Image: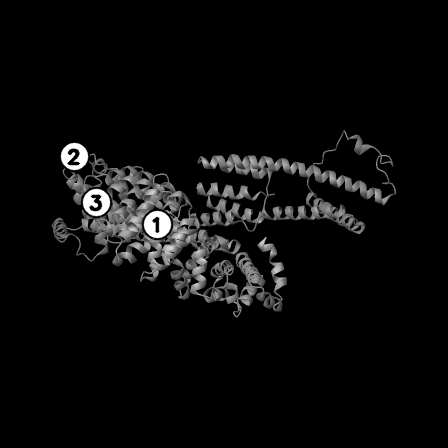
Amino acid sequence: MENKEDFDNFLKNVDEISKMVKDMSSADTSSQVKAMERADSWLGAAKLTDSKQQKGAINRTVINTAPSATVTAPLTSASAPGLSGDPGASQEAFMRMLEKDAEERRKRRKEREEKAKDLKARGNAAFTQGDYESAVLLYTQGLEELKDMQELYTNRAQALIKLERYNDAISDCEWALKCNERSVKAYVHMGRAQLGLRDYAKARECYEKILEIAPEREAMVKDYLSQVERTERREREEQRAREDCQKAEDEEEEKENKEEEENKASMMMMMMTGGSSSSSRETQVGRLLQLLRKLDTPHQMSLYYCGGLELLTHAIADCTGQTIFRLQNGFGIIHGNSTILSCLLQKSEDPCAEELCLAVLKLWSTVCRGNETNQQLLMEWERMQECVMCLLASTSEVVRYECVSLLIAYTHTKEGSGLLVDKLDMHMLVEPLRRCMDVRGLDTRVLNLLESLAQEHRFRHQIREGLSPILSPFTHRLRNVNGQHKSTLSLYTSVIGHLVYDSGIRKSVASSQECWEAFLVAMDSISCEDRDDLLYPLLGLMINLATEHTPAIQGCAVVCSSRCCALLSDPSGGIITRAVGLLSRLLPQCPAAVEEAVVRGGAVKKLLRILKSPGQESTRYAMRTLAKCTESSVEARQQLSNLDKKLQVLIGLVGEGEEHVAGNAALCLGHCVCEPGVARALLDTDCVLTLLRHAAADDNADALQRNAAIALAKLCQAEPRHMTRLRELHGLEILHACMKLIS
């Protein structure tokens, strides 16, 4: 098949033949006859097409000089019964021939599929090893075996993109879409190929097409579209930088043609003004180029490079300056300088080594600030990991400060944060960063950096096994809330809060007995004026950790529940919400904590007060906590029925609360109606109708429907007079239908 039209015809013919064979195998005689007629018509049309195509050409048909006995034997009633005059037998023989042919084709197809899959696997291996030429060859061989295998086209397109054969890659993606018009990979690779050709509009069209096919891939498409935007912006910046460089070179050439005295006077004026007062953009660009050329001079004193780097940093005033620095090999000039490298690796004993390190770090921060291309080039330098480790371990606090500042500059964009995590070994950097936190003033900078990095799931994954350097200082701060680290506790809590989004880290922290003991110390130590700033985020972290069931949590649950009950009277609504949220996680893990909260903590009265006040999140937590208390404690059920004799709060929440609140309210109601006198007190309420509505609703969640049905059954069992009302509402049939949920 030489072109797309041949391929389309091939697929169409395969579908037509498959349908004819299926109809011939049908038990319906009329379908068989119609299929035979279609087959005769199709074969006749095919022969006519072949004769037209071969007219005037050389006849290359080879005569079979040794025909098989099956073919040459005369058709008799013994060899082919009924062919001479029995149409049914003739049709049956034809069907057997078609089935045999179909089976042979199926076997050959399967053999070709196996070969194609093997070639695809070998091509994938070659691609992984970076041998893209071999990968293309293997994928091509696979397509010779199986031309309608979509994966071979998309895989070959990916290899072709690596070889920068973008037009060939686009062609392969088009063929893949003929095999499967909803192929996401085909549109992804086509978009990459169009991006390689710098056709940004078509690249966007390809990525936006994915949203029509797979709307759930919105996040992925957004990333690809951002990549297109960044590439297009970088091209504009580089084009502008080249134009400015050309203008500056033209201006410099013009200056060289002037008189020597005028040239000297001009240079003297430039040195006196520092170049900052010049309004000519070409003059600024020319000065930048001149400084880069002077810095590209080996074996100079450290002071020479230090001054040049400082001037260069001041000369880079905007994005164009950053681009010129990159295009004029600015990174290579610095990285290839042995004097500068020795200082960065902290191996130089030169008195100016510290100043030179600071000059380089400030320059890097300037050229990388907001410039993703420059950020990537710097991080791809093979000595960058080593330099960062050495700079963070420097004896100079100022050098460490500037190094951390450089890393923070990366975290201002999501792409920059990703570059740090991908290019640097975060597991190795955690310990040097921890040592930096011992320096007052630098600790806040390091925590800001860690807070940004902790939002990257790849960072969390890297440090999962090396959490101690971060967790140990955190517990120390918790035990010394009123010490010198008080100002950073909230920020540190935020860092740990982001880290525990990783399930492995969350389980590790939740299992730390030392950490939970430090939580209790901090809850006692935090003063009233600091509660919103320190206690509020700390309670949020504890709520997240309490989703895990660990011995450490269970061991501290009683004391922690007592602290939370005390906080239920706090004047801050946010503190109350989080305290009751923590209670809702602790009580299910420890029966002793329930008794502590109910008997000594006065939890039932406080929870009932919260439920009477507006606040969706606090209501959800409070209702869940109260349901657990009434489930485990007779004292809790008695207190609740005494405080609210007709359980109006619970009935109201069952009727009008959101799904989870209503479900827990129904559960709590079911616990309470079993207490003596409670069901009788509800005779003049609408609790039967309220519960029945939820039990009868088909669109309810199973938990809400089940809890409502159970509460209704317990109510009628405790007080038979409720059964009369239930019969009036035809509720017995509804309860019977709910038995499947209860069982």
Report the disc number at residue 349: 2
Q: Specify the quadrant of the image occupied by residue 713.
A: bottom right
Q: Residue at x 54, y 43 (%)?
A: 151
Q: Are marks 3 and 1 in contact (CB under 8 Å)?
A: no
Residue 36, given in percent of the width and then of the height, sits at 78, 47
Residue 154, given in percent of the width and then of the height, sits at 52, 44
Instruction: Tell which circle, 2 or 1, labels the residue nearer the N-terminal end.
Output: 2
Measure the alpha-carbon separation of dots 3 and 1. 35 Å
Measure the alpha-carbon separation of dots 3 and 2. 24 Å
Residue designated by label 3: 439
Measure the alpha-carbon separation of dots 2 and 1. 57 Å
Residue designated by label 1: 559
- The three-letter amino acid code for the residue at tag 2 is Glu
Quadrant where the N terminus is found in the figure: top right
- The three-letter amino acid code for the residue at tag 1 is Val
- Residue 284 lies, with reference to residue 129, above or below; the image says below
Q: Are marks 2 and 1 in contact (CB under 8 Å)?
A: no
Q: Under tag 1, what secondary structure?
A: helix
- Residue 226 lies, with reference to residue 120, above or below; the image says below
Q: Specify the quadrant of the image occupied by residue 81.
A: top right
- The three-letter amino acid code for the residue at tag 3 is Val
Q: Is residue 408 visible?
A: no
Residue most extreme to the front: 676
Instruction: Tell which circle, 3 or 1, labels the residue nearer the N-terminal end.
Output: 3
Horizontal side of 183 relative to 538 (left or right) equals: right
Sort mark 1 into few (<14), some (14-19) or many (20+) by Cα contacts within 10 Å.
some
251 or 634: nearer the eye? Answer: 634
